[in-house]
Image (cartoon, helix red, strand yellow):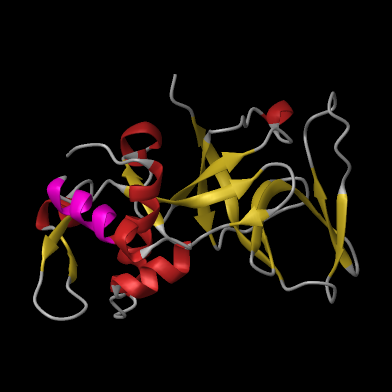
Amino acid sequence: MEPLTDKQARVLRYIEQRLREGRPPTQRQIARHFGLSQNAVYQTIRYLRQKGYLTPAAGHRNLRLSEQYGSAGRDEAAVPVVGHVAAGEPILAEQNIDSYIDVQRFLGLGKEVFCLRVCGDSMIDAGILDGDLVVVRPGATLQDGQIAVVLLDDEATVKRVFFRKDRIALQPANAAAGYRTRYIRKNEKDVRIVGRVIGCLRRL
């Protein structure tokens, strides 16, 4: 399949998320969501169809993923790459699937795990660089000092986690940059451990 521009990829991910929720969007809703003109959305959808990601469907909300895109990369060994996670200041971890990657081939793992792409350099001393994919196991038992993805309200970050009586400490790993450990009181934010980081993938 032909590669997508950044705008085309963002629109496709939004459409895919809405379709998974059973709420196919109109072109007007897409335009409003991204702050685009309806003509720009029309052209983007036309390109997505030409490149084989969408297929025509009947009705007002006539958006449907193509069979080719719907099955691409979804074999038993493939797991989703879900949004981004910050190694630095927390950023929104959007719950949409960028792509699929065969981590079983690399790490001998199955579909209970997923990947997040890292943004930032605060974990480089732990071997996690900007642009890496961290492999996350949801629900895994976490001990003091282990690296995890932590959700603070709707923001996600990857850090070493230490548990204290009434707070948790999120410790970076970049001595040269002077990042400070962040302390979060349990009643300060909606804090949730998404999962333990069990691997890191890097494209060379």
Percent position of residue 27, x then y:
30, 70
Residue at 19% across, 54% down: 46
Q: Position of residue 75 (x, y in %)?
A: 20, 49
Query: In terms of depth relative to the viewer, which is nearer, 193 or 204?
Result: 204
What kind of secondary structure does the magenta stretch mostly adopt? helix
- Asked if residue 193 is positioned above or below residue 28 in the image, the reply reads above
Would you place residue 51 above or below residue 112 in this image?
A: above
The part of the image, by quadrant, that contains residue 28 is bottom left
In terms of depth relative to the viewer, which is nearer, 154 or 42? Answer: 42
Residue under the image location 28 percent in, 53 percent down: 44
Instruction: Decide which of 40, 124 is in the foreground and name it.
Output: 40
The image quarter containing residue 32 is bottom left
Please state the extent of the stretch shown in magenta in the rendering.
42-50
Q: Is residue 75 visible?
A: no
Place of residue 119 in the rendered image (x, y in percent of width and height, measured from the top left): 61, 40
On-image quarter of the N terminus: top left
* Left or right of 159 in this view: 59: left
**Image check: 16 left or right of 132?**
left
| Label total for image | 0
Quadrant in which the C terminus appears? top left
Tell me: residue 18, above or below residue 68. Answer: below
**Which residue shows up at 53% across the image and 33% down it?**
132
Residue 201 seen by the camera = yes
Q: Is residue 13 magenta?
A: no
Instruction: Check residue 45 for magenta coloring.
Output: yes
| Left or right relative to 16: residue 67 | left
Q: Position of residue 72 (x, y in %)?
A: 19, 48
- Who is closer to the viewer here, 136 or 30? 30
- Residue drawn at x 21%, y 51% is 48
